[in-house]
Image (cartoon, rainbow, N blue to C red):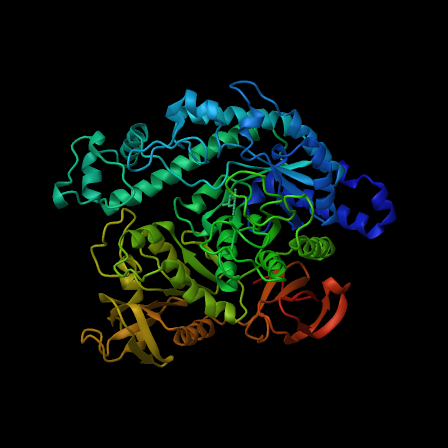
């Protein structure tokens, strides 16, 4: 850290720069120390924000004589963090057991000279050719029995004990060398864990894993109902390893096995790193698949990490602010604390069907949206394209000539703003009164058997999320099993799997005064992906005082109306009934397939000090908006900000004695905004402001003193 505080000539002539960088790094180090050094680090919001802007940088792809120029350009753009090393295994260990990390040490020293902190990626996503050719058992096998080969990446077998030994060794070497380096602030393990293996050894591991979980084959046969189609297993080694088309119990357990296997893979490296590094250095991994990927359970995977981080790409087209905002909130919920955007696109990607570019200004809005939703760092992928290699067309900050690309100046603007605003955002974070519950078991259970190919769980989540954001509310998206105290309203759009424990927790939340709203398909399955031997919502039927009589996949719209308004349902509709005398019908279906006609679509019931509600249909957006207004009203959730023009998003980060509002104009037209009270404009040196005009893709960071600091 001392290195960041050293004055260079530039700092002497630019006092603001000096103060900015110093604050930034005092905050960065403090925040990261807080994040990683105490058990309390896993608490929501225990870290203070230090806004960092940075880039993925691959010095091994360039002559060393070029490095200084790259880093000087980064510094000039106020980039203060680089992620290095991931994919550089053949440079770090050119032959088995021969390590060369000196080049990386020299790169880190040069970064220090330019006031740039370093996150080291372990290179385990891309094993060198010597490794996989000498030890082919380290290669991954796909479901069709084909072995992966060298020349791409992710060709390794995540379950291979030998591969893990190599990973532990390279991670240890790196950690021993850089674990006390003041400029290294953290570690990223591998890169976007993705592909599992279906080789015979992994299948045997799966069978052992099942044996450990079920104890006896009788138990497994019973939970999977294997009398069906003569699936009954007499020996553990008869059980297949498949990712699709199998028994739903097996498919769900395979996802659990994949989660545990990746978690073990990761743990090997966490152990190797942790024992060799300063506690201030964080350990993370960058989750890919636009956060929504479901190869494994992200809650489980991030449990062992100090920090959640994800790779935020738009791909084709323009930023979808609702979807992207929801994904930030989802990532924040993995550890219930601020997070990092470890990769994002500088303009365009190279993997979309049409690799369009973000409009001028959109990259800046996107960076600020991340901060608004709780990110403390944003890193671009990547600094410069290797002259050859599979990703030559991807967006970069400098071109093949090493000179800034047009996007560089927009990124430099963001960097300057981050430096300027960091002190005001210190110790602030999003705080929500409303939570959406997510569960991987439920997602997987529905995905294995969607029953309607149009049933898209992300869309269902967004259907529920959008109207909450339209009311300018902060929304947490959290694991269904997370503690719910403090939330006035909890909604669960797709909790297909509800175990007895989860049911008890949800019921207790309601009885103690919470307002719970369950969405379609709730409580149909138990934790083995078996049908509950009672109607939906399974173990919550008696609490609800009503149930689902039958569900219907729809191929058209069905009319719905009631005290909340009228509109339509599509894709999915459940015929509900009430049994308890205090259960009330809020919406009913109109004329439809005969079965649904005039039947309840949404029911509610008071329970203890709270209410439990069930909505059995996917409603159109206007009716969903009305239903949401009713939910908020009942839970007495007050808007956090006054009404805003349609394209403007507001994000709130709450600190002690002050609140930061980040206003984002996602539209191309200027927007007029009247503020709900006097604020200061942090980007304009705290000038007082009561109204403002946000230009096309405009951003404002406002501070209000003495606002509520809690929910
Ligand atoms: C990410 C990956 C990066 C790079 C990037 C391109 O998924 O982690 O290494 O390939 O995509 O968009």
Q: How many numbered marks, from 0 up?
A: 0
Where in the figure is residue 383, as x and y percent of width and height? 63, 44
Where in the figure is residue 230, as x and y percent of width and height? 12, 41
- Residue at the extreme top: 97
Vertical comparison of 79 with 679: above or below: above
Q: Tell me, yes or no, if residue 513 can be seen here.
A: no
Report whether 700 appears left or right of 564: right
Return the residue nearer the eye: 445 or 65.
65
Report whether 250 appears left or right of 410: left
Return the residue nearer the eye: 600 or 153.
153
Vertical comparison of 504 with 6: above or below: below
- Residue at the extreme right: 13
Where in the figure is residue 463, as x and y percent of width and height? 41, 66
Return the residue nearer the eye: 642 or 150.
150
**Figure quadrant of the C terminus:** bottom right
Q: Quadrant of residue 429?
A: bottom right
Q: Quadrant of residue 622?
A: bottom left
Where in the figure is residue 652, as x and y percent of width and height? 60, 63
Vertical comparison of 572 with 119: above or below: below
Return the residue nearer the eye: 144 or 233.
144
**Figure quadrant of the N terminus:** top right
Q: Tell me, yes or no, if residue 507 can be seen here.
A: yes
């Amino acid at each position: 850290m001392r290195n960041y505080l050293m004055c260079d000539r530039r700092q002497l002539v630019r006092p603001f720069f000096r103060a900015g960088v110093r604050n930034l790094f005092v905050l960065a180090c403090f925040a990261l120390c807080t994040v990683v050094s105490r058990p309390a680090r896993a608490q929501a919001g225990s870290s203070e924000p230090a806004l960092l802007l940075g880039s993925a940088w691959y010095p091994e792809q360039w002559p060393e004589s070029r490095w200084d120029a790259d880093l000087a350009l980064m510094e000039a753009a106020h980039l203060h963090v680089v992620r290095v090393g991931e994919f550089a295994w053949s440079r770090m260990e050119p032959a088995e057991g021969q390590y060369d990390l000196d080049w990386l040490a020299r790169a880190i020293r040069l970064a220090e000279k330019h006031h740039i902190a370093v996150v080291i990626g372990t290179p385990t996503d891309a094993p060198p050719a010597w490794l996989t050719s000498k030890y082919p058992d380290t290669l991954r096998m796909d479901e069709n029995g084909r072995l992966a080969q060298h020349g791409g990446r992710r060709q390794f077998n995540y379950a291979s004990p030998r591969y893990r030994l190599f990973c532990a060794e390279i991670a240890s070497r790196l950690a021993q060398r850089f674990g006390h380096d003041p400029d290294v602030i953290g570690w990223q393990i591998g890169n976007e864990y993705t592909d599992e293996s279906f080789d015979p050894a992994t299948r045997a591991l799966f069978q052992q894993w099942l044996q450990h979980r079920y104890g006896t084959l009788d138990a497994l046969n019973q939970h999977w109902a294997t009398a069906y189609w003569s699936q009954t297993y007499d020996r553990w080694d008869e059980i297949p390893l498949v990712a699709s088309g199998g028994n739903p119990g097996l498919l769900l357990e395979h996802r659990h096995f994949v989660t545990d296997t990746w978690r073990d893979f990761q743990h090997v490296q966490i152990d190797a790193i942790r024992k060799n590094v300063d506690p201030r250095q964080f350990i993370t991994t960058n989750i890919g698949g636009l956060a929504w990927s479901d190869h494994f359970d992200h809650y489980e995977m991030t449990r062992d990490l100090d920090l959640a981080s994800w790779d935020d790409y738009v791909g084709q087209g323009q930023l979808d602010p609702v979807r992207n905002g929801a994904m930030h909130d989802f990532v924040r919920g993995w550890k219930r604390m601020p997070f990092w955007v470890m990769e994002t696109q500088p303009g365009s990607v190279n993997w979309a069907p049409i690799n369009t570019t973000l409009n001028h200004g959109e990259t800046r809005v996107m960076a600020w949206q991340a901060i608004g939703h709780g990110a403390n760092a944003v890193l671009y992928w990547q600094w410069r394209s290797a002259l050859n290699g599979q990703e030559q067309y991807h967006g970069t900050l400098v071109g093949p000539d090493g000179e800034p690309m047009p996007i560089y100046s927009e990124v430099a603007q963001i960097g300057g703003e981050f430096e300027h605003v960091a002190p005001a955002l210190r110790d602030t974070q999003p705080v929500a009164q409303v939570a959406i519950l997510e569960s991987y078991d439920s997602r997987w259970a529905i995905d294995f058997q969607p029953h309607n190919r149009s049933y898209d769980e992300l869309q269902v989540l967004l259907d529920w999320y959008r109207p909450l954001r339209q009311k300018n509310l902060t929304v947490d998206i959290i694991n269904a099993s997370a503690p719910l105290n403090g939330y006035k309203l909890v909604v669960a759009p797709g909790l297909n799997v509800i175990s007895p424990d989860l049911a008890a927790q949800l019921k207790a939340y309601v009885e103690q005064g919470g307002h719970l709203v369950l969405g379609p398909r709730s409580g149909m399955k138990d934790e083995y992906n078996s049908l509950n031997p009672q109607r939906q919502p399974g173990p919550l039927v008696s609490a609800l005082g009503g149930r689902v009589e039958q569900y219907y996949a729809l191929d058209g719209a069905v009319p719905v109306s009631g005290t909340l308004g009228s509109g339509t349902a599509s894709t999915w509709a459940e015929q509900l009934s009430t049994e308890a005398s205090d259960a009330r019908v809020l919406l009913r279906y109109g004329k439809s397939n005969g079965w649904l006609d005039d039947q309840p679509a949404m029911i509610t019931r008071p329970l203890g000090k709270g209410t439990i509600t069930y909505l059995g249909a996917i409603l159109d957006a206007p009716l969903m908006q009305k239903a949401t207004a009713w939910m908020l009203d009942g839970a007495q959730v007050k808007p956090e900000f006054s009404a805003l023009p349609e394209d403007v998003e507001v994000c709130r980060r709450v600190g002690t004695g002050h609140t930061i509002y980040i206003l984002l104009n996602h539209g191309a037209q200027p927007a007029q905004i009247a503020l709900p009270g006097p604020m200061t404009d942090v980007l304009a040196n705290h000038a007082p402001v009561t109204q403002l005009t946000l230009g096309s893709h405009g951003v404002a960071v406002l501070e209000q003193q003495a606002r509520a600091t809690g929910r």
